[in-house]
Image (cartoon, rainbow, N blue to C red):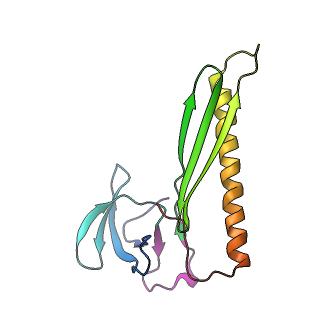
């Protein structure tokens, strides 16, 4: 996600009842961080996560699109016969994790990249299915309030 100087950002927290923190982006650093002047007057360098979004200065999100970011952490573990990928994302309802496995058939040539691609694809597919299932449950239960993915 891209942030520009002058953007107003809002950072939410997993703490129930805690108000979001707002600030103004002064600059984007070369390391991907943001130098932010927070509404409380403090200035800091902040590494944005999926709990950070750009808001309009008036706070009227209806008049402009909301930009959100998201990060999925992936771990690959590989040996001579199989590759296991674990994909993990943190949402406002908790951590979601999924695993995908690719196994080498006897007699097949070892091509590690193929095993990694299969295992990762399977893990991401399962994670996608879990996210869609959670969204369907949220819709059917008519949960209200702003809920976003968080880092």
| Residue nearer the viewer, 64 or 52 | 52
Q: Quadrant of residue 43?
A: bottom left
Residue 61, relative to residue 75: is it above or below? below
- Identify the residue at image location x=65%, y=52%: 127
Residue at far top of view: 107
Left or right: 70 as drawn, with respect to 26: right
Left or right: 133 as drawn, with respect to 30: right
Report x, y in % for residue 54: 47, 71
- Identify the residue at image location x=37%, y=71%: 6
Is residue 110 one of those drawn in magenta? no
| Residue nearer the viewer, 143 or 11 | 143
Report x, y in % for residue 86: 58, 43
| Residue nearer the viewer, 25 or 148 | 148
Q: Quadrant of residue 10?
A: bottom left
- Which region is colored magenta? 52-66
- Identify the residue at image location x=70%, y=48%: 125
Report x, y in % for residue 124: 66, 47
**Picture mark count:** 0
Residue 41, relative to residue 72: is it above or below? below
Left or right: 29 as drawn, with respect to 98: left
Residue at far left of view: 42
């Amino acid at each position: 996600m891209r942030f520009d100087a002058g953007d107003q950002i809002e950072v939410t927290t997993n703490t129930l009842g805690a108000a979001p923190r707002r600030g103004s982006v002064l600059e984007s650093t070369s390391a991907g961080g943001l130098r932010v002047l927070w509404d409380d007057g403090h200035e800091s360098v902040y590494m944005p996560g999926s709990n950070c979004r750009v808001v309009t200065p008036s706070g009227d999100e209806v008049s402009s699109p909301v930009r959100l970011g998201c990060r999925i952490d992936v771990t690959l573990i590989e040996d001579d016969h199989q590759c296991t990928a674990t994909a993990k994302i943190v949402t406002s309802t908790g951590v979601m994790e999924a695993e995908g496995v690719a196994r080498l058939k006897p007699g097949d040539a070892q091509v590690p990249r193929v095993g990694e691609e299969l295992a990762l694809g399977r893990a991401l597919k399962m994670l996608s299915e879990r996210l869609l299932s959670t969204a369907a449950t949220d819709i059917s239960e008519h949960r209200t309030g702003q809920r976003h993915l968080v880092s």
